[in-house]
Image (cartoon, helix red, strand yellow):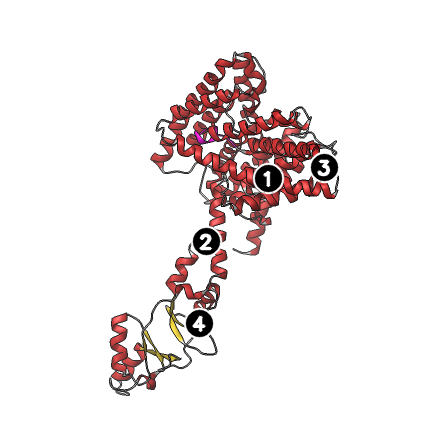
Amino acid sequence: MSIGTKHALNWTSILVAIPVGLVASLVTLGFRQLIELIDLLLFGGQQDITEAMHVYPWYFWPLIVGGGGLIAGFFLRYAAALEQKETIRTDYLDVINARLDSVPTRTSLFRGLSSLASISSGASIGREGPMVQLSALSGSLMGRWLFKSLPLKNSDVVAMAAAAGLSSVYHAPLASAIFVAEIAFGISAMQRLIPLIIASGVAVLTMWSLGYRSAIYPFSHAQFELTPDSILLTVGVGLLAGLFGWAMIWLIGQSKRQFARIGSLPLRLGLGGVLVGALAIGSTQILGNGYEVIVRIMAGSFLLPMLAALLLLKMLATAISVGSSAVGGLFTPALLIGALMGQLVALVAIMAGVPVSNAEVFAAVGMGAVLSSVSQAPLMAMLMVLEMTLNSSLLFPTMIACVLASMLAYRLQSGSTYSVVNSHFSRSDAKFDFDNGIISQFIVSGAALTPEDSVGKAMAVSSLKRERFVYVIDHKGTFLGAVSIHDISHKVLDKEITLTSPVSCVMDASFPTIFENQTIREGWEAFARITLERLPVLNNPQERKYVGALTKTSLIQKAKDFI
């Protein structure tokens, strides 16, 4: 591809990002309106599920959440059957990561309906999941119908729409663009990031023009005070967030294993809804995605015992909802768990005599930290908090907490809630092993003779081992060179030598070698300079003792784990 073509492609991406961002924001707004319509029918217009559920007696709550889960299960079962029959991948992150042609329409719509039933009935999941999925679907349809003649991959249009959808949900254009680049691409390459930022920005401008102008969590009044005590408390919040993120992922894993015993998706989601509804008897604050509860936490509306109870109940409710296969996101539930944890830590610190001027500041820091630990996307998490609160003083503590939380969760062998991230980690680990691993782990035995052995014996050994070259070593094991069976055959036919001639007369003393303590990367580079399938491996440059052979195939097998 020429430089001019690359520039044309970049400009095309930028121009396409504008309408994609506009449409994606309208899709998320439409989904939100559907939720509000269902809330009007079920609860008389109460938009916050934590308050709306009180319209009915407490003994109806498990039935309402369970009934929603049952309906969601029927939609999800149909979507899963389509995916299995057509062997397709619906999730927009998989489509972007694998550079697939399109987001499947029918399965995305049915998963969206499933999510709509779960969310409207109070399941402990976020709204952003289906909103972003449907936004990605809109981008995919635009790519196939409107932009098919442009030099642009459909998966790139899907990425723009996904970033725009997330941006319109949280009013965080930069964090949303970073999220798609960090999670789906596994990189933050500028040539891919620019169209995502533009699409996200257009989505936010669209939401603003429709009246949605305020920050998601208005928190600009509080300021983080840069003192040794607050920094130490921030470190504590970050480390605890890593533990809570690990615990959250572990709970979800356990929940999935238990619910997997139920073969019927409607029954599975119905039971999950009943259990969440039963937990709601303890407190309806655990229902829904948790947005309104976060607002109350930032207003200082909860005391210490209530925060602890909500933290435990919300983690259980979210694990049950996600484990039962409810279609939705983990963004806002993770933010709520982080806010509860951060506020709890700050209040305990105050009781212990630590001078904390504003406990709610640490609720915001905890939001980003827990989101970072469960998603393994710290850059996105810290920017998300900054953009959602419009509080620049939170940037520094959130950076510290997000990085610590992500690192600790990773060190505890906890994967991300996004399978795409786990594959990025696997490739990254494989690449690290490739660059830093030692040749010695790949050594295999190779044919070796002494200089006095005959060329006839060399040909026999070559035939037995099926190797083009036979290595020559002295009686001490020092590598001397190699003989080519091809050269021997020519010289014998030309009667320059006989089968009884010693191999020393046809030995190549300058034959390339590699040493056992060199890295796999250096071995790969050595093979790139030659056309050989095998290289002799020596112990070190000084002694040059022959220890075996390294094959090109073994390095290719190793490299395929990250290519």
Residue at 44% across / 66% down in the picture?
439
**Label 2 crowding class (10 Å Cα cut-off): few <14, some 14-19, many 20+?**
some
First along the sequence among labels 2 and 3: 3
Does 325 lie within the magenta span?
A: yes
Residue 328 appears at what percent x and percent y?
50, 30
Q: Horizontal placement of 351 versus 255: left or right?
A: right
Q: Secondary structure at mark 1?
A: helix
- SS state under label 3: loop
Residue under circle 4? 514
The residue to which callout 2 is attached is 562
Q: Nearer the viewer, mark 3 or mark 1?
A: 3
Query: What type of secondary structure mainly makes up the magenta span?
Result: loop
Please tell me whether mark 4 or mark 3 is closer to you in this view: 3
Which residue is tagged 1?
240
Label 4 and label 3: CA atoms lie apart by: 60 Å
Please tell me whether mark 4 or mark 1 is closer to you in this view.
Answer: 1
- Tell me the amino acid under the disc marked 1: Leu
| Range drawn in magenta | 321-329
The furthest residue to the front: 352
- The residue indicated by pointer 3 is 354
**Sequence order check, earlier mark of 2 and 1:** 1
Q: Mark 4 vs mark 2: which is more N-terminal?
A: 4
Q: Nearer the viewer, residue 139 or 446?
A: 446
Residue 189 image offset from top left, x and y in percent: 58, 49
Is residue 318 in view from this perspective? Answer: yes
- Residue type at mark 3 is Val
Q: Nearer the viewer, mark 2 or mark 3?
A: 3
How many angstroms separate mark 4 from mark 2 (CA)? 24 Å
Residue beneath the point at 30% across and 71% down:
467
